[in-house]
Image (cartoon, grey):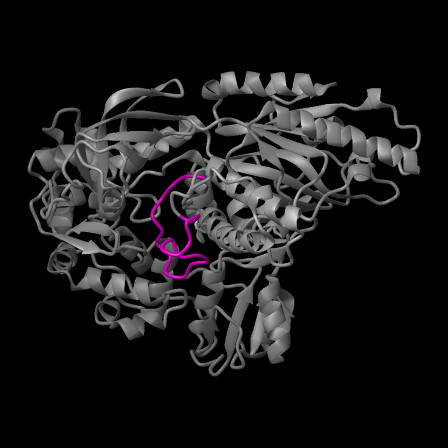
């Protein structure tokens, strides 16, 4: 876990009232010194704090404390509950992680996805080994494990990946579902997102596979790809991800699979959650090592650093080897996992409510260093967001020389009280972008004074909560370059040949001072620039000419409106139909669009109210770049064929959900995101969300599958699935 300012308005614990939320003390007095009443009071504070940390880590992917601090808080809470037999019915120690996000469907796991007990101390691993051997000896004595031979005990050692844990389900060899770990019992349905990851096979290899297979894996962003992707973000003036884990978690929670497909995710599979085979199918492997071999034969990617050892000391040596090699690995790791190999041994040992008794994580120590802040640089992103970066006296942190660290935003600077000259602690923990968690020696006066004017264009800076923004809009050179690059992206206008270097070159040559200037370019002007030829110049002009009549949703996505990606752009286009209708829409009208809440509506309205943005849009239209009205093919059905009906969609359909919603809305129906008493039908595709089905049952709303939905539409003269215009 890493440290960050909280942006949540509703919290499990208030940092002003609970000392274990931000910068928590972890040097606790012995449990034996406590009375039951004092222990209960401290446990209540710890429960609330751990819930807050779970939420920030698993749900928001924006944690408040380090992994080490979290582990100490969790262990203290567990020690208090055990020592004083405190009630644990609603305690985080009975839970397994965080809660699913509201923005994604929730699905129930095939089998629990439990956490793993962990420690950085080798003696804790030896104690784990003693518990395993004692538990197996007890099982042998009771007859649950007849003929147990201690010499048969073996451990499988694997790197502990620092990514996002997922469940992937195959039925009859075909990929059917993926879900995040969530709270261990239920997780977010990320089926379409995971489907885009190249290392996740659409079908298992061969014909010899179980009828139903659920496997656990870790989605991650390879280190080299992460560095390249972050560099691309910074070139566009956008805030980079702090580390590969945040990049993977943030990507997988994108609601638009097209966005996920563009980001370099990968996956390792490392455990069986369920293996169901008929009489003729393959039996579940009796050892974990064999299960991993089966993964390989089935086409499921496994890690090549796995080792089988015969004793706990060899397992500890393995951890030390991975620790020494961690910087050479192309994926982030924060320890190793030691697992009992034999399935029969695992079953005999069983699990607690939170963790299996047959596995233990031997974690790495955190990587920190102390150095001096020599200066602060303020970067300007595409949306005008200003991000402060501490320029440091270079220092070695875990074998990597660090000279810069993010300070996140003005509120973070104020909270830290950091200024130039201060001695600060740098926390890296394997991350490419380090951050400053605390000032260890105050040498400067007060906190760094954030600029009132944009460092690039001089326009006024506005604060929005903890963040700061340049008000220069497209008149700011930094924002202009990022805006042009965004306009040319594949998920916007898809203009090939307009990368960051060329955009910068066009601006510096005085050829592009605003977005509309792109459409005033001539082949002769381009050919005269260094590195250009007649062919490349003509190609770019042709690419630009091809975008003069763009689809409305592509046009909106290309404008770079804050909080508006490709999916929201399509929803806006489908709802309003024309650019003029959208330009005139107030916040109430914008909030009628599905998935557009108050904050997004205000962001859209603010973007269109800025004079420089209105001027840019008018300039584009004057140059013949005018988006076509959004249309959905209605076939021969009248526009009111579905008038008065309200649909809610859940699960995976044969077309994207946004397209299904637009299809029925074009014929007079309403499509909402939640079930209510006004809903006429819940349309359930593959792997539907349980919460919507429960709501439908509670409200007496009919649930129809896609075939019944198609028949219902056919009765009203509406085709399904939709066809292109």
Q: Is residue 35 magenta?
A: no
Q: Position of residue 159 (x, y in %)?
A: 58, 26
Q: Quadrant of the C terminus?
A: bottom left
The residue nearer to you, when weighing 695 against 670, is: 695
x 41%, y 66%: residue: 632
Reply above or below: 682 against 153: below
Q: Residue furthest bottom?
A: 644
Displayed quadrant of residue 166: top right
Is residue 82 toward the left or the right of residue 488 in the image?
right
Image quarter in which the N terminus is found? top left
Q: Is residue 652 visible?
A: no
Q: Position of residue 378 (x, y in %)?
A: 18, 38
Q: Is residue 11 visible?
A: yes
Q: Which residues are magenta?
A: 1-21
Q: Would you place residue 271 above or below residue 703 in this image?
A: above
> How many numbered circles are shown?
0
Q: Is residue 530 above or below residue 385?
A: above
Q: Quadrant for residue 705, please give it.
A: bottom right
Residue 60, x across and y down, in percent? 43, 50
Q: Residue at x 34, y 54 (%)?
A: 7
Q: Is residue 374 left or right of residue 38?
A: left
Q: Quadrant of residue 510?
A: top left
Q: Quick check: is 13 in the magenta stretch?
A: yes
Q: Which residue is at a point 54% across and 81% down the rendered structure image?
A: 677
Front-most of residues 361 and 646: 361
Q: Is residue 296 left or right of residue 282?
A: left
Query: Could you say where residue 451 lies in the image, as x and y percent from the top left?
Result: 12, 44
**Horizontal side of residue 136 vs 714, given as left or right:** right
- Which residue is at the front of the view, 147 or 126? 126
Q: Residue at x 59, y 61 (%)?
A: 689
Q: Main secondary structure of the magenta part?
A: loop
């Amino acid at each position: 876990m890493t440290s960050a300012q909280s942006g949540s308005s509703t919290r499990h614990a208030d940092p002003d009232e609970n000392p274990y939320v931000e910068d928590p003390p972890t040097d606790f007095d012995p449990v034996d010194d406590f009375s039951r009443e004092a222990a209960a009071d401290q446990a209540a504070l710890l429960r609330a704090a751990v819930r807050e940390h779970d939420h920030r880590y698993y749900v928001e992917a924006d944690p408040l404390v380090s992994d080490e601090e979290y582990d100490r808080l969790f262990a203290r809470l567990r020690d208090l509950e055990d020592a004083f037999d405190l009630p644990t019915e609603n305690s985080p120690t009975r839970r397994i992680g965080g809660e699913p996000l509201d923005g994604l469907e929730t699905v129930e796991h095939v089998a629990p996805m439990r956490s793993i007990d962990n420690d950085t101390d080798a003696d804790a691993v030896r104690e784990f080994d003693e518990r395993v051997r004692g538990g197996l000896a007890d099982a042998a004595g009771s007859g649950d494990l007849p003929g147990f031979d201690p010499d048969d005990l073996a451990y499988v050692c694997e790197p502990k990946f620092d990514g996002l844990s997922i469940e992937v389900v195959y039925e009859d060899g075909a990929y059917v579902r993926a879900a995040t770990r969530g709270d261990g019992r239920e997780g977010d349905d990320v089926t379409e997102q995971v489907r885009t990851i190249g290392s996740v096979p659409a079908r298992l290899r061969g014909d010899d596979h179980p009828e139903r297979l659920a496997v656990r894996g870790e989605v991650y962003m390879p280190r080299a790809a992460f560095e390249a992707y972050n560099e691309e973000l910074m070139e566009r003036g956008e805030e980079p991800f702090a580390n590969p884990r945040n990049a993977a978690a943030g990507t997988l929670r994108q609601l638009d699979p097209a966005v996920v497909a563009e980001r370099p995710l990968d996956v390792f599979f490392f455990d069986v959650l369920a293996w169901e085979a008929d009489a003729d199918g393959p039996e579940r492997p009796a050892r974990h090592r064999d299960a991993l071999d089966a993964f390989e034969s089935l086409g499921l990617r496994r890690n090549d650093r796995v080792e089988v050892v015969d004793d706990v000391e060899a397992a500890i040596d393995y951890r030390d080897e991975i620790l020494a090699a961690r910087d050479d690995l192309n994926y982030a790791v924060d320890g190793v996992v030691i697992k009992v190999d034999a399935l029969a041994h695992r079953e005999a040992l069983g699990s607690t409510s939170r963790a299996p008794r047959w596995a233990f994580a031997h974690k790495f120590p955190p990587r920190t260093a102390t150095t001096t802040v020599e200066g602060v640089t303020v970067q300007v992103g595409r949306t005008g967001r200003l991000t402060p970066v501490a320029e440091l006296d270079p220092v070695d942190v875990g074998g990597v020389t660090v000279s810069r660290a993010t300070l996140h935003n003005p509120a973070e600077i104020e909270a830290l009280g950091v200024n130039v000259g201060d001695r600060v602690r740098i926390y890296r923990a394997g991350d490419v972008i380090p951050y400053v968690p605390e000032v260890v020696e105050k040498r400067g006066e007060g906190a760094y004074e954030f600029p009132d004017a944009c460092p690039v264009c001089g326009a006024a800076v506005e604060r929005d909560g903890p963040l700061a923004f340049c008000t220069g809009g497209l008149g700011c050179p930094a924002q202009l370059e990022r805006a042009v690059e965004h306009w040319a992206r594949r998920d916007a206008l898809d203009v090939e040949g307009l990368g960051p270097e060329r955009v910068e070159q066009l601006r510096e040559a005085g050829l592009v001072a605003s977005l509309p200037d792109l459409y005033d370019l001539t082949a002769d002007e381009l050919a005269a620039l260094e590195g250009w030829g007649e062919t490349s110049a003509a190609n770019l002009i042709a690419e630009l000419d091809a975008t003069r009549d763009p689809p409305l949703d592509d046009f909106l996505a290309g404008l770079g409106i804050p909080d508006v990606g490709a999916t929201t752009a399509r929803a806006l286009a489908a709802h309003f139909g024309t650019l003029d209708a959208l330009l005139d829409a107030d916040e109430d009208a914008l909030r009628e669009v599905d998935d557009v809440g108050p904050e997004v509506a205000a962001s859209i309205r603010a973007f269109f109210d800025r004079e420089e943005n209105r001027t840019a849009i008018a300039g584009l239209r004057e140059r013949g770049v005018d988006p076509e009205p959004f249309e959905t093919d209605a076939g021969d059905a009248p526009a009111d064929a579905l008038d008065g009906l309200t649909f809610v969609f859940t699960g995976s359909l044969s077309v994207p959900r946004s397209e299904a919603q637009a299809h029925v809305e074009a014929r007079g129906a309403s499509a909402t995101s939640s079930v209510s008493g006004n809903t006429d039908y819940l349309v359930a595709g593959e792997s539907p969300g349980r919460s919507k089905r429960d709501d439908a049952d509670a409200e007496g709303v009919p649930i129809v599958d896609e075939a019944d939905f198609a028949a219902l539409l056919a009765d009203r003269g509406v085709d399904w699935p939709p066809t292109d215009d």
